[in-house]
Amino acid sequence: MKARVHIMLKNGVLDPQGEAVRHALGSLGFDGVNGVRQGKVIELDLTETDADRARESVTAMCEKLLANTVIESYSVEIA
């Protein structure tokens, strides 16, 4: 079973990498980009075959390691 975790900085948390990308896009002539938020995607290949248990396990992984829940939010997709 596959899992995909999307991690983004929470609203209100400064995103210097996103701002650098926004500035670089403007420098390359891509006007009209008012903001960029950069995140990360983590793909996991799990041995678990039950979707509910897989989601529970991946959520625990996020809470303990994959995401800094003080400043980041995450969402989990199970396929």
Image: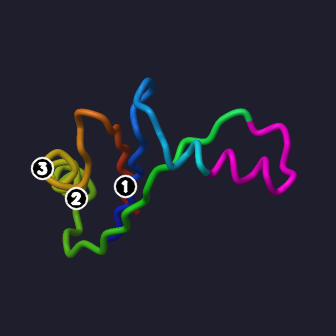
Tell me if 61 is positioned left or right of 72 in this view: left
**Is label 2 in a helix, a strand or a loop?**
helix
Q: In the shown orientation, is residue 73 left or right of residue 23?
A: left
Position in image of residue 58 (x %, y %):
22, 55
CA separation, marks 2 and 3?
15 Å
Q: Earlier in the sequence, mark 2 or mark 3?
A: 2
The percent position of residue 48, horizontal first and vertical second, equals 19, 69
**Above or below for 44 versus 65:** below
Quadrant of the rendered structure where residue 49 is?
A: bottom left
Badge 1 density bin: few <14, some 14–19, many ≥20, Cα 10 Å: many
Residue 35 picture location, percent across and down: 65, 35
As rendered, which of 1 and 34 lies closer to the eye? 34
Instruction: Compare residues 51 and 29 and report the one nearer the observer.
Output: 29
Identify the image quadrant of the C terminus: bottom left
User: Number of marks in the image?
Assistant: 3
- The residues tagged by marks 3 and 1 sit, at their Cα atoms, a distance apart of 14 Å
Of tags 3 and 1, which is closer to the observer? 3
**Residue at 78% across / 47% down in the picture?**
26
Residue range of the region highlighted in magenta in the rendering: 21-33
Residue beneath disc 2: 54
Q: Which callout, 1 or 2, points at the residue further toward the start of the chain?
A: 1
Label 3: state its secondary structure: helix
The three-letter amino acid code for the residue at tag 2 is: Ala
Q: Do the numbered discs 1 and 2 sit on residues whose CB atoms are within 8 Å?
A: no
- Residue at the image position 16 percent from the left and 54 percent from the top: 65
Q: Which mark is residue 5?
A: 1
Residue drawn at (34%, 63%) of the image = 3
Ranked by sequence position, the earlier of labels 3 and 1 is 1
Q: Nearer the viewer, residue 58 or 22?
A: 22
Disc number placed over residue 64 in the picture, else none: 3
Which of the 4 quarters of the picture holds residue 2? Answer: bottom left
Residue under the image location 37 percent in, 44 percent down = 75
